[in-house]
């Protein structure tokens, strides 16, 4: 199969570290070379993740002077106390709800697609994967605007519903929970399909065949063999959709309505219109901590399987 | 000078200023000279310059003769020399917010090369301008933000002797609340916030902002995604000041907005999109967007609520880091010219505060209540103010309660 190497190339990038355990012990020279190769990655992470995160944290401990400039002479946790004000609870729950719904839907839609490409894609696998990534060739903003045109009262969706006779007058589709979750699921679906594909494709079909030989029916074979063995892909897909979804600003802003405020919107408002950087930083940092914490907890039960140690 | 208005008094004044600038004379020098040698003798060369060959002779308008920036030694000794206008100017304005010929005409007239950049939101612009203008001489901050800029020392105090055309401003603009005596800024254009609605969807002709609380339009109502505008409208409907600092009144306004929220389709500043798509039938909009909305949906009309409304304005200001302050003053003065101001209005469809410009403004604009409301309503307009950190936080926390809850 000419396309097999292509498909496999995605493996080590998106996939898991389970290969590491299988590698032979490296010599000292190899390990040094490995350390040198790590430098760009570590430098990148430090410069663009650790340093900004530290800056956000420091600002979040500060306060404002009369001209709204950040002052750091009296560091305190006041902003975090404000962040736990019940005002923000509904907004935060909203964000969680959207992210959770997006993740569940992305997995539910993405898994069968990934499975189908892997098992039945045949020699078109590479092409099918390119099709999954095809939307990235157009700006996300433009694609979201396209959803606005489709979903609005005089839009394509309402026209179709009325043409078929399902409704008599336009349904309100845009500016609702529905449109936000639809838009986010649409946007993040490729991030779910790719890691799922990698883990499904690496599953040896012989294992499923063996299960069937041992009188497992299709359902049991899936639940007890395929699903557990592709769990690393499911976890990766969950992380890759949930994390960007909880901080997503553009989709709820464009497709959302009066009742769909998210925490990202509140942070944006605090930084710009509220001119309250310390408080905005505190909310942003909390969001980051909660996301990271959640990720670590999600990875925990899988650590032996995924990381291999 | 050729396209300027014909009224001689203003022309002479303009030439006078330019003459003073050229001769490095301050207004005080001129007065001193008049005192010493008499008015005629002192003014003779200027009058000669005015009447002589009219248009092009008096000012050093030819680009080639533009003096090099400030370094050349002055032949005429003067006790307090006013530097001649610099040969360059850096201007930073909103996108599509000036007449199409304004800048080229200015360049031609004064031989000053203008670098003209534009922005489309204040976040972007203010970040770039920083505390000293970030390399720009003149920019166009919103009036609400002037106090903060002044407090930071970001703005140069204007030298009114270099702005003779400031007399063209209407009386109500001479001493605005955000900048007493226009000490650091000059108003440029103003707009109102009112209500736009689709006549094919709304029954009758609403005149009150209460139409935005009408349950029969549920989920087809929009409000601006702007806490000060949303609270401003609610406060005015309740009969309070749009800039109130009374938390009790703010609580009432919050309750009013919370009552409205279930009817609201979206809080958005993209009113051009929402009203033209048909999703929103009636919404709080900036009056100046009416033309753009009508371009997409001709059934949309605009009104200012009878209870009163919010007025906003943009200003012209010189930043403290300006390297070309004289040219900057010259530019602002040029923008205050009646014909230039009218040409700007005729191109961008915003009314300016320039009373003298009115006779040159397109009658269609003057007659449009969305752009130029009747005097009875103008007296009910309130300009939004910078309320300071503490009060702003009171508004913002209620806004977040409204949006989140």
Image: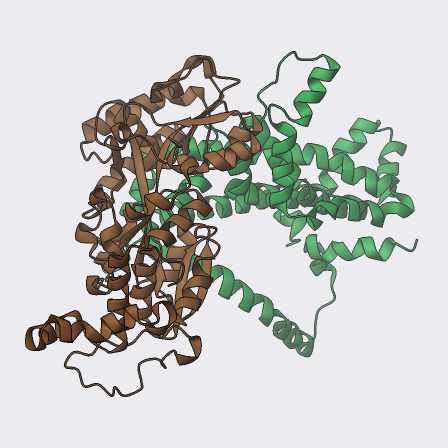
Pick whichever, B274 or B51, lies toward us.
B51
Q: Which chain is green?
A: A
Q: Position of residue A218 (x, y in %)?
A: 83, 28
Which residue is outermost to the right? A1
Pick whichever, B37 or A54, lies toward us.
B37
Identify the residue at horizontal 23%, vertical 70% (top origin).
B47
Residue B363 vs B235, above or below: the answer is below
Using the rendered view, name the quadrant where residue B87 is placed. Answer: bottom left
The number of callouts visible is 0
Using the rendered view, name the quadrant where residue B403 is placed. Answer: top left
Identify the residue at horizontal 40%, vertical 32% (top origin).
B368
Indicate the quadrant containing the C terminus of chain A: top left, top right, bottom left or bottom right. bottom right
User: Tell me, what hue is chain B?
Assistant: brown
Q: Is residue A103 visible?
A: no
Q: Position of residue B344 (x, y in %)?
A: 41, 50
Q: Position of residue B111 (x, y in %)?
A: 41, 72
Q: Is residue A11 visible?
A: yes
Q: Position of residue B391 (x, y in %)?
A: 22, 40
Pick whichever, B73 or B64, lies toward us.
B64
């Amino acid at each position: 199969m000419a396309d097999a190497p292509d498909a496999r190339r995605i493996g080590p990038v998106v996939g898991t570290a389970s290969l590491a355990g299988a590698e032979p012990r490296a010599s000292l020279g190899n390990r040094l070379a490995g350390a040198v190769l790590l430098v760009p990655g570590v430098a990148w992470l430090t410069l663009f993740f650790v340093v900004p995160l530290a800056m956000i944290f420091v600002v979040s401990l500060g306060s404002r002077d009369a001209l709204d400039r950040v002052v750091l002479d009296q560091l305190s946790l006041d902003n975090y106390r404000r962040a736990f004000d019940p005002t923000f609870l509904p907004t935060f729950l909203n964000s969680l709800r959207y992210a959770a719904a997006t993740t569940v839907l992305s997995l539910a839609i993405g898994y069968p697609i990934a499975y189908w490409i892997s098992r039945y894609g045949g020699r078109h696998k590479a092409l099918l994967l390119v099709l999954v990534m095809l939307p990235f060739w157009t700006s996300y903003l433009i694609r979201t605007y396209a959803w606005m045109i489709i979903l609005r009262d005089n839009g394509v969706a309402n026209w179709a519903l009325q043409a078929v006779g399902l409704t008599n007058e336009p349904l309100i589709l845009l500016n609702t929970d529905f449109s936000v979750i639809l838009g986010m699921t649409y946007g993040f679906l490729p991030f779910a399909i790719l890691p799922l594909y990698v883990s499904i494709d690496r599953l040896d079909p012989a294992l499923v065949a063996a299960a069937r030989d041992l009188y497992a029916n299709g359902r049991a074979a899936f639940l007890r063999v395929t699903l557990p063995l592709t769990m690393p892909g499911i976890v990766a897909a969950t992380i890759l959709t949930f994390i960007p979804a909880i901080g997503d600003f553009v989709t709820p802003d464009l497709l959302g309505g009066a009742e769909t405020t998210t925490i990202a919107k509140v942070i944006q408002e605090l930084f710009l219109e509220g001119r309250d950087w310390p408080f905005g930083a505190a909310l942003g940092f909390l969001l980051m901590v909660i996301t990271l914490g959640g990720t670590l907890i999600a990875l925990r039960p899988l650590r032996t399987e995924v990381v291999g140690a | 000078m050729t396209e300027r208005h014909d009224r001689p008094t203003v022309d002479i004044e303009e030439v006078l200023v330019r003459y003073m600038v050229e001769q490095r004379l301050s207004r005080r020098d001129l007065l001193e000279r008049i005192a010493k040698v008499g008015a005629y003798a002192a003014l003779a060369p200027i009058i000669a310059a005015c009447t002589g060959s009219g248009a092009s002779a008096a000012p050093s308008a030819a680009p080639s003769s533009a003096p090099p920036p400030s370094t050349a030694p002055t032949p005429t000794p003067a006790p307090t020399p006013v530097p001649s206008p610099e040969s360059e100017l850096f201007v930073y304005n909103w996108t599509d917010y000036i007449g199409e010929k304004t800048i080229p005409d200015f360049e031609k007239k004064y031989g000053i090369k203008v670098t003209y950049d534009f922005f489309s939101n204040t976040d972007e612009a203010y970040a770039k301008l920083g505390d000293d203008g970030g390399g720009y001489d003149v920019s166009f901050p919103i009036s609400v933000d002037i106090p903060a800029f002044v407090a930071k020392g970001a703005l140069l105090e204007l030298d009114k002797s270099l702005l003779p055309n400031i007399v063209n401003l209407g009386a109500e603009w001479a001493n605005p609340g955000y900048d007493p005596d226009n000490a650091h800024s000059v108003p440029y254009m103003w707009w109102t916030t009112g209500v736009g609605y689709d006549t094919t969807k709304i029954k009758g002709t609403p005149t009150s902002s209460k139409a935005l609380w009408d349950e029969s339009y549920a989920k087809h109502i929009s409000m601006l995604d702007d806490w000060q505008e949303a609270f401003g409208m609610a406060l005015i409907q309740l009969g309070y000041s749009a800039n109130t600092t009374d938390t009790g009144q703010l609580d009432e306004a919050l309750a009013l907005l919370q009552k409205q929220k279930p009817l609201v389709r979206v809080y958005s500043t993209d009113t051009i999109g929402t009203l033209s798509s048909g999703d929103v039938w009636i919404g709080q909009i900036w009056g100046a967007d009416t033309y753009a909305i009508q371009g997409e949906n001709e059934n949309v009309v605009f009104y200012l609520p009878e209870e009163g409304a919010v007025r906003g304005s943009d200003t012209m200001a010189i930043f403290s880091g300006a390297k070309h302050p004289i040219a900057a003053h010259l530019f602002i003065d040029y923008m205050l010219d009646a014909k230039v101001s009218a040409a700007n209005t005729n191109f961008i469809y915003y009314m300016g505060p320039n009373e003298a410009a009115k006779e040159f403004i397109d009658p269609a604009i003057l007659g449009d209540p969305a752009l130029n409301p009747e005097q009875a309503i103008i007296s009910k307009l309130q300009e939004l103010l910078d309320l300071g950190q503490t009060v702003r936080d009171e508004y913002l926390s209620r806004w977040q309660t409204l949006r989140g809850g």
